[in-house]
Image (cartoon, rainbow, N blue to C red):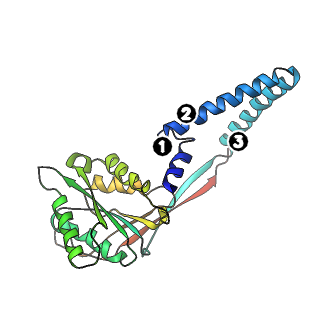
Amino acid sequence: MKSTLRRLRRGLWEPGASPVTFFVGAFLFAISANLVSSRLQEHSTLASGFVFGIVGLILVVLVSRRWLADDIRPTVDYGAPRKHKWLVALASPGGGIATAEKAIRYHLPVLQKVYLVCSRGKEPPLSEPAAKDLIKKLEQEGLLAQGQIELIPLSATAFDDPEAVRSAIEALYDLLPEGIAEHEVVIDITGGKKTTTAGAFLAGLPRGRHLEYVPATRVSSEGRGEEPGDPIEIVIDYKLKKLGH
């Protein structure tokens, strides 16, 4: 219910969020404008004042936006994340799945739901087999019940497409049940390819969402992480700064 209301509210100014809401709102606005216009036509002086007043108001808004515009300056900080109820993680093939496992174990016992974004298809390397093995392992250990971890399988092409990854993760926020807010979801951007990470990062940028990554505590001579450490939260804040002339 909450996610539906959120989507409908966004639809008032964003057609892609809810086309029906956007066009119904636009239609009702048009009707209201016509009604006001017909009433004002009965009083020409009042109508002229109304028209010129609206034009003046628009000019004031445009000038204000030009001379008093807000410049959004993002700031980034890091720290140990609090435990979240929902986790979205990226599954890497083979031993790379260890970063997703580390993130899952870190957020227990608060963790209620896990989504693993993985790649599937016919040409290796694909991460779906490693993701399934991780699910089986955690269920056998009794750390998570059956159904608490779900896969978000993407084709190898989509897994390598930042926009496809972002859209897949974005859709999860519309599934949030009552009692789970967006700030109780964390996106771990560690696994997958660099383009996969980019898509996950974009999904976590809106204000109020949380991001994290799992650093390596030991690195091989080739520069590859061999042992994952505890997650680190990426705290992004947006500050407004007034721009002068």
Q: Secondary structure at mark 3?
A: helix
Circle 3 packing at 10 Å, graded few (<14), some (14-19), many (20+), is few
Q: CA distance from mark 3 to mark 2?
A: 29 Å
**Residue at disc 2, secondary structure:** helix
Q: Nearer the viewer, mark 3 or mark 2?
A: 2
* Kind of residue sitting beneath label 2: Phe
Left or right of 135 on screen, residue 180: right
192 relative position to 63: left or right: left
State the residue position of label 2.
Answer: 23
Q: Amino acid at mark 1?
A: Ala
Task: Tell which circle, 2 or 1, labels the residue nearer the N-terminal end.
Answer: 1
Task: Say if 245 sits above or below 230 in the image.
Answer: above
Distance (Cα) linking label 1 and label 3:
29 Å
Q: Earlier in the sequence, mark 3 or mark 2?
A: 2
Residue type highlighted by circle 3: Ser
Image quarter for residue 152?
Answer: bottom left
Mark whose residue sits in front, 1 or 3:
1
Determine crowd level at label 2: few under 14, some 14-19, many 20+ residues with C-alpha closer than 10 A. some
Residue 224: give its label. Answer: none
Residue for point 39% across, 51% down: 171
Alpha carbons under labels 2 and 1: distance apart? 12 Å
Dots 1, 3 in contact, CB < 8 A? no
10 Å crowding of disc 1: few (<14), some (14-19), many (20+): some
Q: In this view of the protein, can residue 29 be seen by the observer?
A: yes
User: Which mark is on residue 64?
Assistant: 3
Q: Which mark is residue 17?
A: 1
The picture quadrant where one finds residue 56 is: top right
